[in-house]
Image: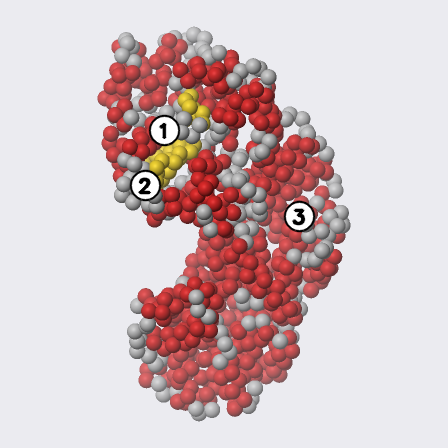
Amino acid sequence: MTTALIGRDRDLHKIRDLVGLGTGGGALLVSGDAGIGKTAMLDAVAADAHAAGARVLRAAGVEFEANCSYSGLNQILFPFQREIDELEAPFRDALRVALGFASGSAPERLMVSNAVLLLLRAVAAGGPLVLVIDDLHWLDPASAAVLGFVARRAAGICVSFLAASRSGSHSLNDSGALPEYRLKPLDDESAALLVAHRSPCLVASARQRLLTVACGNPLALLELPSALPTMRGPHSGEVPAILPLSRRLEAVFGSRITGLPHTSQRLLLLAALEGVGDLGVLQAASRQTGEGYDLEDLAPAERDQLVYIDEGARRLRFRHPLIRSAAVDNSTSSERRAVHKALAQVLVDQPERRAWHLGEATLEPDEKVASLLEDAARITLRRGDAVGGMRTMIRAAELTPSASGRSRRLATAAYIGAESTGALPRAQKLLDDARHTATDLNSSLHSAAAAAVLILNSDNDVDTAHSLLVNAIEAGTHGYDTGDKSLVDALHTLALVCFFGARPELWRPYHCALQKLTPKAPPVLSALGKTFSDPARMGAAALAELDGLIAELPEVTDPAQLQRTGSAALYADRLGDVREAQWRMVRMGRDGGPARRHMAGLIHLALEDYLTGMWDEAAQLADEGIQLCETHGYTGFAWYFLYVQALLAAARGEADLADAAAEKIIHWATRRKAFGAAHYAHHAAGLAALGRGDFADAFEHANAISPAGSLASHAPHALWATLDLVEAAVRTNRHKEAAAHVAAMREAGIAELSSRHALFTQACAALSTADDDEAIKLFADALAVPGAQRWTFDFARVQLAYGERLRRVRATSESRGPLAAAQSTFQHLGAHPWTERATTELRAAGASKGRPRVIKPHTLTPQELEIARLAASGLTNKQIAERLFVSHRTVGAHLYQIYPKLGITSRGMLRDALES
């Protein structure tokens, strides 16, 4: 086969090398204009690979199947159902649901991607594997995203991935993640040789005309000879020379199709719209048309080299995508509708495809078809394809007869766009269309939820979004049934709006709705109602629910559930336990998944990184989040990432940057009554003030979050500012206020929430007491809290305060230990203001040059080294224990021995210590 490709030897050689045939695998995208020879190159490489003993898997994007999620993946993996069943249960189930082999909850894109990766690695273990994808630009988005994930990891699993895409089209390589080889036209010599070989009877003038018009395009050189008579003069039917080459070729193919018998033309149209080439479906559908033709009528098209039968796959294939396009272009709208109707009658066991064909066959509104399309949209969503689900829901709305039903479906599509895909402008238009369709839209839950998300990203205020949601929820037509997904979605959006507003009156309708839910409130909504609203008073009561939610995470595939569990874990300081789930959302987003989930994962990870001392990663994640918000128009969520940037700047002594970012958030939040966002900004600004020694300003910022002496109701971020407020109060001689705040912390029992809040409670009590002996005991108790070392910066701040108190009672030698440890941590973090404070205290305590005591590292045992590496990667003690089959207490004991061996004082310093 390769010898027939005139003028392509050099291209073939480079493509074989770049794709890693026989050398361990790799990935390559071949691009070029229509007819340039991409398919021929793929055929040649596939033939070479097959001859060398490799297994070749092929698929092609089909323009008329782009709305059917995972249809491309189905083409590739259909023969491997036995191998799919041998995968581990989570991957097997996710892949079977995605491919339509089973029903179930929506698998997240990352789970499907990893399942395909594992499957292909297993197949490749039996010998070289080559994956060949033609017409990538027409592949459905869900399949394209998964294959992009696989392609970027092809070399790691010894798979060769080769795809072709038309130049200028959108594909999985828009971000430039794959190496690209652009196939150029044939040079003049090769073009002339090809014409001489395939059209030897052309006279010299016609040959020259052909070479001039074709511009080195191989398909044009092969197909245009039959059209040359139409290019000789200005008469009817001439193909204008100014048309693009692909249109010339479509005109050529169109003339070849119209020259076929009518029955053959109809079969080509049937095959083009069916998309897969399934011979059984084509045969059955041909009978449904009632026109008396069957597959035998394809013979003229086969003889004319327009189509062929792939005997191995039992599929009908078009010789070139333009043939498929020409078959559709040459048909009438009534002919296309008839074919879609016939296909729908046959595809009864494939509801998603059947609904799509019915939608294309239907002209007038039809509730039955619209309902089937809505069901198909939900199937698509369960497969994790939010974009495809939104598109199908829009078509369902277009075919809905009643105004109320049409507005409801448009509102659902708008909600998907606003809450998942990141298509805010499209969501706004859909919502506007829904409002123009029906006057009672305010009672639609998905409409209200979509509108609320759009309001948060506009110039309107939180109260407007809140009223809209509450009115829709209290309309009562849904009956408060937890089986109503739109109600659950609306309540989660209400929780988000209430969090933004940070006022108790906003949360009352939420709690009232939860009490009415039957049979009972879902655990994630119940937990959110406690930890996300008023954790100081209700957080401890949610810990059991939170434990259950976290335990289920390894099996959860719904990105919305991952996000909501992360939010519930935030103020219970359990982000470390949901870290892997949040990374799943981020990886999913980076591979083309829902933008809103991507952002949620980023913010949860960035906050956890700040608390545990991984500040460089926190800064990177915040930058990524800012860019994501700008790309998708989520202006109402950018403040999360600005806060992380402000917090890091404050801790590192870049007070001007921190103040500017905090002021920007406060300005945005105050106008919109988003006081929760303002609390975050005050926290960062207060930390910056502490760093520069302006304790009066620090007190004002902390007091703006929650007045001294109380933990403000439904202001969850007040918990993060307790140490700041008490320290600032003591430094400004507000001892009564400091003591009152400690009393409020103890009364609320926030020490039960987490080791960090237990650390804060004891440390704040130590700071506020005038009794030195009591203070020293309280500081020692604070630093002895199990797990407190996890909170790197906060733990070091308490060590610093402890050392300062010891030095002031003239226990100078005892003060050097905590001061040196604090200084070491601050230096590692780059927390310059606190480093300077610790250094000054050390000098005053008589330490040489104020340097911390450095313990000489000793060799770690193999098990200690493994535990250290896993801990440095971000795993919790429990996760490490599960991986190494030991108890979490054993892991903690090992880490207790590891820290002094490496000369470090906290978990956050492990990574750098191991690297050095």
Residue at 61% x, 64% y is: 545
Spatial distance from mark 2 to mark 3, Cα to Cα?
Answer: 48 Å
Spatial distance from mark 2 to mark 1, Cα to Cα?
Answer: 21 Å
For the residue marked with disc 3, what is the amino acid? Answer: Ser
Q: Nearer the viewer, mark 2 or mark 3?
A: 2
For the residue marked with disc 1, what is the amino acid? Answer: Thr
Which of disc 3 and disc 2 is earlier in sequence?
Answer: 2
Please name the residue that numbered disc 3 is placed on.
Answer: 486
Q: Nearer the viewer, residue 556 or 805?
A: 556
Please name the residue that numbered disc 2 is placed on.
Answer: 128
- Indicate the position of residue 791 as horizontal and vertical percent values: 48, 71
Mark number, residue 39: 1
- Indicate the position of residue 23 as horizontal and vertical percent values: 27, 43
For the residue marked with disc 2, what is the amino acid? Answer: Pro
Other-residue count near label 2 (Cα within 10 Å), few / some / many at <14 / 14–19 / ≥20: many
Mark number, residue 22: none
Residue at 34% x, 27% y is: 40
Residue at 45% x, 48% y is: 87
Helix, strand or loop at label 2? It is: loop
Spatial distance from mark 1 to mark 3, Cα to Cα?
Answer: 46 Å
Helix, strand or loop at label 3? It is: helix
- Which of the 4 image quadrants contains residue 813? bottom left
Which of disc 1 and disc 2 is earlier in sequence?
Answer: 1
- Indicate the position of residue 506 as horizontal and vertical percent values: 69, 60
Helix, strand or loop at label 1? It is: helix
Q: Nearer the viewer, residue 359 or 107?
A: 107
